[in-house]
Amino acid sequence: MTGSGTTERRSRKDAARNREAVLAAADDLFTRCGSPEDVTMADVAAAAGVGKGTIFRAFGDRAGLLRALYEVRLEPIREAIEAGPPPLGPTAAPRDRVPALLDAVLCFKLDNRRLALALEEGGSGSPYRAEHYGRWHGLLQAVLEQIPGLPDSDFTAHALLAATRADLVEHLAGEERVPREKMRAQLADFTARLLACGPPRGAAAGE
């Protein structure tokens, strides 16, 4: 029994070490690549010093690897959202928290342009089907619902998140060379104007 337990612990330790090596290799490759499609599972395996089978066992497929890497990079932001101080944390006023959440999404995608693009392009042909999109939308919708007089929080959440799509961020930052701070200011202004809108004229309860 002792020998079996030792072998099992060693196996778990090896698996954890391989997982960290794969994530580190993928992180480096996606940071340096010209296009997300340039990075293959074989490239990641070679950089990590493991076989492709190890990656498939740990992450399932390329999309699973991308999601795992995304979650690792996103962890500091998630902690700030769940338990941090205002304006990002849960005690912030809704009108302050909405632009803070969107700014966090934008900055994350600017810092992780290739990864975000690869992940959204891998969402069954649509970024809206990706699991992470559903989480962001749900969080944003819940905060928007706390703002009195703001119509249709579901659509508003979609509209705001559309301004942070990875392909748009890549186009603005890469092709149009829009500076980071200008993009943040533009998003903040867009958000403020949208949140300032009240119900459409003539719209009454039940109409």
Image (cartoon, rainbow, N blue to C red):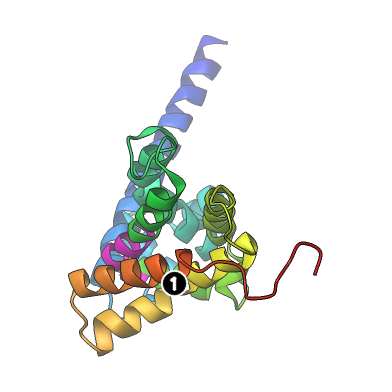
User: Between residues 29 and 7, which one lies in front from this camera angle?
Assistant: 29
Pick the front one: 99 or 204: 204
Residue 49 image position (x, y, % from top left): 32, 54
Residue depicted at x 21% and y 74%: 182
Q: Is residue 61 above or below residue 203?
A: above
Q: Which residue is mark 1?
A: 118
Neighbours of disc 1 within 10 Å: few (<14), some (14-19), many (20+) = many
Identify the element where label 1 is drawn. Answer: helix
Residue 114 place in picture, x, y as percent: 34, 71
Q: Is residue 141 visible?
A: yes
Q: Quadrant of the N terminus?
A: top right
Image quarter (top left, top right, bottom left or bottom right) of the C terminus: bottom right
Residue at 39% in and 40% down: 92
Residue sitting at x 49%, y 74%: 162
- Residue 51: image quadrant is bottom left
**Viewer-side residue, 124 vs 14:** 124
* 107 versus 164 height, above or below: above
Instruction: Determine the residue positioned at 38% across, 38% down.
Output: 79
Look at the image and say whether residue 109 sits in the magenta stretch. yes
* Magenta stretch in the rendered image: 105-114
What secondary structure is the magenta-colored segment mainly?
Answer: helix
Tell me where residue 173 sits by quadrant: bottom left
178 left or right of 117 in image: left
Q: Is residue 69 visible?
A: no
Q: Position of residue 67 (x, y in %)?
A: 49, 56
Queried whether the magenta region covers residue 132, the answer comes back as no
Q: Residue furthest bottom?
A: 175
Is 113 on the left-hand or right-hand side of 69?
left
Q: Is residue 125 left or right of residue 52?
A: right
- Name which residue type carries label 1: Ala
